[in-house]
Amino acid sequence: MGKVVGIDLGTTNSVVSVMEGEKPVVIANAEGTRTTPSVVGFNKDGELVVGQLARRQSVLNPQNTFYALKRFIGRKYTELTPESKRVAYTVRRDETGNVRIPCPQLRKDFAPEELSAKVLRKLVDDAERYLGDTVTGAVITVPAYFNDSQRQATRDAGRIAGLEVLRIINEPTAASLAYGLDRQNTQTIMVFDLGGGTFDVSLLDVGDGVFEVRATSGDTQLGGNDFDRKIVNWLAEQFLEAEGIDLRKSDRQAFQRLTEAAEKAKIELSGVPVTDINLPFITATEEGPKHIETRLTRADFEGLCGDLISRIRRPLKRVLKDAGVSPMQIDEVVLVGGSTRIPMVQGLVRNFIGREPNQHVNPDEVVAIGAAIQAGILSGNVKDVLLLDVTPLSLGLETISGATKKLIPRNTTIPVRRSDIFSTAENNQTVVEVHIVQGEREMAKDNKSLGRFKLTGIPPAPRGIPQVQVAFDLDANGILQVTAVDKTTGREQSIVVQETSTLSSSEVDRMVKEAEEFAQQDRERRERVEKRNRSKALIDQSQRRLREVTLDFGSQFASYYRRQIESLIRELEDGLQRDDERGIDRAQADLQDALYDLNREVRLQFEEEEEDDFFGSIKRTITGESKRDEIYPPYQNDPYDYETYSPNPPRRSYEPPSRGRDPYEAPSRGRDPYEAPSRGRDPYEAPSRGRDPYEAPSRGRDPYEAPSRGRDPYERPSRPPRRPSRPPSRPIYEDDWDDDDDWF
């Protein structure tokens, strides 16, 4: 079985973590950062880019770059607020009323779950690269105030990404796991989670390894993006008043630039009292280009966000009321989420609770760490920890009057089972329809519909006489099972409410298959790109190496390799231009071999120069011996043996470790073994043109010495073979031969 990780799928950034032993570890992504932007895009070539690479193209390619997907997941189009739909890309509805996001580059519509699955896949790939093992399961966190449809949609995104989602847990609950794992004394903790797109607040009792959630509340449409939008609107209104152009509607690129500038200004105002916003060439008119150059103070920013602070106060009051505690009874306040760095948010918490919030835990990573701890609990690596979570919203039935009958109130500890007795509304009624809803409104039509089913076969009777028992079973995974039983006949009908997301089972299966196919295409495209990058890098490396060798040993030494390598470089460049995969592979392999031969020759030069000493050089100059003859004794063979001096002698029992070549063959294939390294030259011609053929290449050398320094003239230029167990066979070259002996 593969590894199980914890994933914080955020609106702005996402994080993945894993348990190593008894300690949770945050995994850095391929770019080297510990947080991955929750952005998905398709570049001009149709290639998928996720994370920081997608975020970089958001200004130049806004219609094919998708962010803040968490606000759309598991929601109908009619449930979206006008603010959430104000993004640089297009958001539309399909024929069933679900949210769809068109991608002009691919001419295809995506569901938010499908795009979120690509972020999850990116996190899993980074985790597998770090762990060196396959990741098959995950614990994914969601905002505490997500309804059942949004939770099931998050589970579907995990399935599309190829993961087995073991548990969906609330983000504040996960943060409490990371914060209070080692605590022994029981404390009441408030977790204040303000992220990029959602806001949650939870009260928990933590101690002795038990984490019990007492109450939770929040707002799934409130987060750091709303603070950014306040600055965007302020900038756009100023520009509209001065130039008469509304940048929010006229130009997508200008709107995206405004959004990024607003986010940057918000971050800077958390540390400094004033910031400058400069956006040159934001648009152009007949009069010429237009720019934005203004200054925003922290006081002005806080004045713009007054209504958002009021929206934060309401869940704070509600959670204290539901838990039945006062601010004085709270022992610790933990801040979670990047938006909690805003000074006025910290001031609100400080004034409301009456104590300084705890900030020693990284707010960007604490949720993922808690998810990893929960994954360790489920896999058995973490013991003696009990997590008791609650349901964030009430669950009930629709009655005959259209009102909601709540069976499981919000903030009820799960798992839980509740039941009640219902009856017929008309005389002789034989069918009862059970309509399950979720929400806090009194009327069923104002709440979220989770499913319907019918119980048939009820005996005819006056209204109010038949008794139908309806039971709700909510397990720890948040999966609801509803059962209706006629107590008279024993007939039973049930439904498992786990398909309440905006995607059907067939759509999820189709998206899983498409994700696998798309992943294969991405891998093939990435391999082609990497192959071309390697080829270009190899070309640069070869050219650079040739220049270095020429400077170190002269142009004559590198001339043979230069012709060979430059020919292969031209062949490889031609293959890249023609997009010939087979030609690229062949030329790349040949160029690597040629570069290897060049490096080996250079290495031998350096080794012999380092090993040579003054007296040894004098001795070899007088005797004509090679330095290798000192290490390996001369071969005791007949010097006039025709077979030995044959250009292509038969294979010997001992063969040096060079590939398939005769041990006495020259470096290039098929040449005479005693031919000089350059083609067509006299074997005893000096390496440089115009010199005496018997003149030594360098001063003080033997006239019959090979062009390389300190080597035997009949020695092959490759690295000497390992010392054989028995003397090999090679002709001996006597030192007392006369110059008149022309045995050739």
Image (spheres, rainbow, N blue to C red):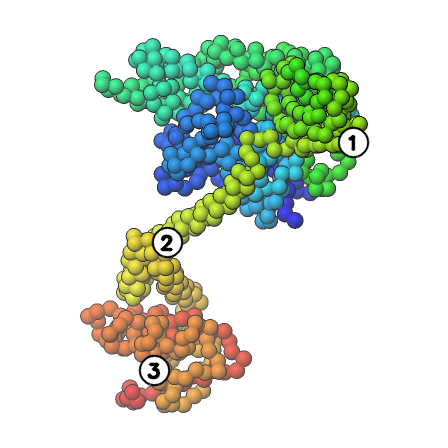
User: What residue sits 48% from the left and 82% below the top?
Assistant: 653
Find residue 570 and report its image quarter: bottom left
Residue 262, placed above or below residue 153:
above
Mark found first going from the N terminus, 1 or 2: 1
Q: Quadrant of the C terminus?
A: bottom left
Q: x, y (%) of residue 599?
A: 39, 62
Q: Amino acid at mark 1?
A: Gly
> In the drawing, what numbered circle is on residue 535?
2
Spatial CA span between label 1 and label 2? 74 Å
Spatial CA span between label 2 and label 3? 37 Å
User: What residue sits 33% from the left and 76% below the top?
Assistant: 670
User: What residue sits 28% from the left and 71% below the top?
Assistant: 678
Q: x, y (%) of residue 341?
A: 55, 21
Q: Is residue 330 visible?
A: no
Read off the residue under disc 3.
647
For mark 1, give the secondary structure.
loop
Q: Pointers 1 and 2 in contact (CB under 8 A)?
A: no
For mark 3, give the secondary structure.
loop
Q: Amino acid at mark 2?
A: Ser
Q: x, y (%) of residue 354?
A: 67, 12
Of circles 1 and 3, the one toward us is 1
In this rendering, position of residue 212 left or right of residue 558:
right
Q: Residues within 10 Å of mark 2 (few under 14, many from 20)?
A: many
Q: Residues within 10 Å of mark 1 (few under 14, many from 20)?
A: few
